Image (spheres, rainbow, N blue to C red):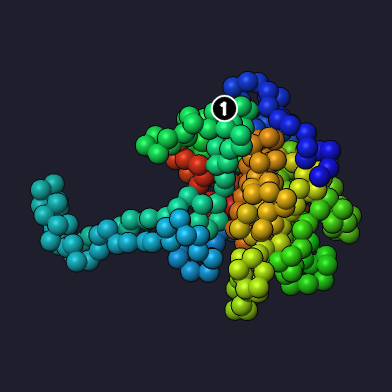
């Protein structure tokens, strides 16, 4: 393990003992204004997956996303009654509404800093037992985040290595990230959002079957512990990837190792299951990125539809 990843409590207290934003503090108003100059074409890219129950590997304890009809044309008698009660009857006019049932960590989503704890503590030393099933997380919850808007850099590792997707056994380290950055010719600035493409989303939609001999077919390429050096060196604010955990699966050295280093120790939010295929196809390596998580009070994460403007 590198010196950076062995450093304890890397950002605890850096922005005050009560801070619950973590490395988002690195995205300054001045940085946002400068980032507005990143787009060249003005083309908009949605990095979010459709909210549905397909195309993602099941996690046993997470409920598959379900959209259920709340109202539709079969409720016309109710709509007619409401219109009559309001004194403005309008036969034939109604409304369609839905109910959405989903885990906050299904599909394209953002991890709150309370998502992972280590040795009884979450980011900035807040106690893990301050979170409850009834009220959710008291500290570091997703509702503390107004949103993310700033410069993002895509390191397209799969394309750099000349493959449609990385072998699931690949553990991305700092050297490979730096090699990709250099080959693309991108600067990575303090406060940037780092996006990493492994190609896993392409594999998922290819129809090819996973290698069940490796981690039961759930193996995925991602960053290992050594990659934290690169993130530290460039003072990254947020890390996102097109795989399920940002980090490699199985985890490097120990369970949730990179989540602990980034979420818990550094206060770096994670974006998972990003759809980076269109950015890769258009060779967009720099963009203005907007991420708006739902303000779920006490929430450990939120579904997101990140918008990149290139």
Q: Which residue is mark 1?
A: 126
Q: Position of residue 259 (x, y in %)?
A: 65, 45
Q: Residue at x 55, y 51 (%)?
A: 109
Q: Is residue 1 above or below residue 145?
A: below
Camera-side residue of 241 and 175: 175
Residue 108 in sight here: yes
Q: Residue at x 45, y 65 (%)?
A: 53
Give the structural element (helix, strand or loop) at label 1: loop
Which quadrant would the N terminus be assigned to in this image?
top right
Query: Does 104 sit left or right of 37 as displayed?
Result: left
Q: Position of residue 77 (x, y in %)?
A: 12, 61
| View extreme (top): residue | 17
Camera-side residue of 33 and 239: 239
Q: Is residue 277 above or below residue 288?
A: below
Q: Residue at x 57, y 45 (%)?
A: 111
Q: Position of residue 129 (x, y in %)?
A: 49, 31
Residue 149 in sight here: no
Query: Does 172 sit left or right of 63 as displayed?
Result: right
Which quadrant would the C terminus be assigned to in this image?
bottom right
Q: Quadrant of residue 248?
A: bottom right
Q: Is residue 92 above or below residue 112?
A: below
Query: Does 189 sit left or right of 254 as displayed?
Result: right
Q: Position of residue 268 (x, y in %)?
A: 67, 39
Q: Residue at x 52, y 39 (%)?
A: 142
């Amino acid at each position: 393990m590198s010196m950076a990843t062995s450093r304890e409590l890397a950002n605890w207290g850096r922005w005050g003992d009560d801070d619950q934003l973590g490395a988002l503090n690195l995205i300054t108003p001045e940085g946002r204004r400068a980032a507005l100059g990143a787009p060249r074409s003005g083309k908009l890219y949605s990095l979010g997956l459709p909210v549905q129950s397909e195309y993602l590997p099941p996690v046993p304890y997470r409920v598959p996303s379900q959209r259920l009809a709340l109202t539709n044309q079969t409720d016309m008698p109710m709509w007619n009654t409401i219109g009559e009660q309001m004194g403005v009857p309008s036969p034939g006019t109604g409304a369609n509404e839905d109910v959405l049932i989903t885990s906050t960590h299904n599909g394209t989503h953002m991890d709150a800093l309370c998502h992972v704890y280590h040795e009884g503590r979450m980011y900035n030393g807040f106690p893990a037992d301050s979170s409850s099933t009834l009220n959710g997380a008291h500290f570091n919850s997703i509702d503390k985040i107004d949103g993310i808007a700033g410069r993002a850099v895509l390191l397209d590792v799969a394309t750099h290595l000349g493959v449609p997707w990385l072998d699931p056994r690949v553990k991305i380290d700092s050297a490979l990230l730096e090699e990709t950055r250099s080959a693309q010719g991108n600067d990575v600035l303090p406060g940037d959002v780092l996006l990493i493409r492994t190609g896993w989303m392409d594999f998922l939609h290819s129809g090819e079957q996973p290698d069940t001999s490796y981690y039961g077919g759930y193996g995925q390429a991602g960053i290992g512990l050594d990659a934290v050096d690169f993130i530290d060196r460039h003072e990254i604010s947020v890390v996102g990837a097109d795989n399920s955990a940002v980090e490699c699966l199985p985890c490097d050295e120990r369970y949730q190792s990179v989540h602990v280093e980034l979420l818990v120790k550094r206060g770096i939010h994670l974006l998972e299951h990003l759809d980076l295929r269109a950015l890769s196809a258009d060779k967009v390596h720099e963009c203005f990125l907007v991420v708006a998580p739902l303000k779920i009070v006490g929430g450990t994460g939120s579904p997101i539809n990140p918008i990149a403007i290139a």
